[in-house]
Image: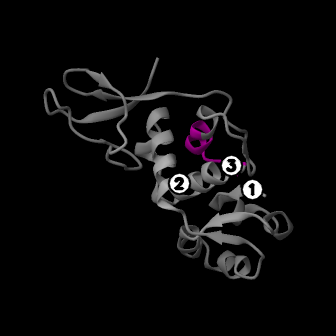
Amino acid sequence: MRVLDTAALLHWPVEQITGNICSQSQQAELERVSPQRWMLIQSIDIEWRDVPPAWLSLASEAAAVSGDLPRLSDVDIDVLALALGMQCPLVTDDYRLQNVMKSVDQVTHTVGAAGAKQVWKWELKCTGCRATSEVPKNVNRSRGGDVGDCDRCGSPLKLKRRK
């Protein structure tokens, strides 16, 4: 058994999807992205799971340590939590999810793209005073842009790859 990210649900043939695990939250995402594919997916034997709060905490913590948390969606966190909590491989083309899994020595497989080759660490960097800090577990999450304000000078914080 494997935990499948939404990319696998969208692109894999039915026989590869059958018998695997997905998050309940992926249903709405899939229906929004591809209503036709969602109709097909509903007829497949998939284990749809709710994510226990303890697993969500585990996933958020792992993503914060790697620095990927600010750029992961709620669905990403759910999928990550299932993979970590169940100790199952995660199938995803999302490099951030792969990065978190690799940073905690867990197995990932890709849907169609080449997989991440190395683990990247991220940090928050102030655009004003240039101070850097670890990515906290309660950081603002968004797909792009600022992830908070600097405690020292109040300038926006950006997510940067740690060197």
User: Counting residues from the N terminus, which is met first, the one under dot 3 or under dot 1?
Assistant: 1
84 displayed left or right of 78: right
Disc 2 crowd, CA 10 A, few/some/many (<14, 14-19, 20+): some
Q: In this picture, which residue range is highlighted in magenta? A: 89-100
Q: How far apart, in angstroms, are the residues tagged by discs 3 and 2?
A: 11 Å
Colour mapping used in the image? one colour
Where does the N terminus fall, quadrant-wise?
A: bottom right
Residue at the disc numbered 3: 87
Residue 80 circle label: none
Frontmost of labels 3 and 1 is 3
Please report the residue visible at 81 percent of the width from the left and 69 percent of the height from the top: 18
Residue at the disc numbered 2: 55
Residue at the disc numbered 1: 2
Q: Position of residue 134 (x, y in %)?
A: 36, 28
Residue type pointed to by label 2: Trp
Residue type pointed to by label 1: Arg
Disc 1 crowd, CA 10 A, few/some/many (<14, 14-19, 20+): many
Residue type pointed to by label 3: Gln
Q: Position of residue 153 (x, y in %)?
A: 13, 28
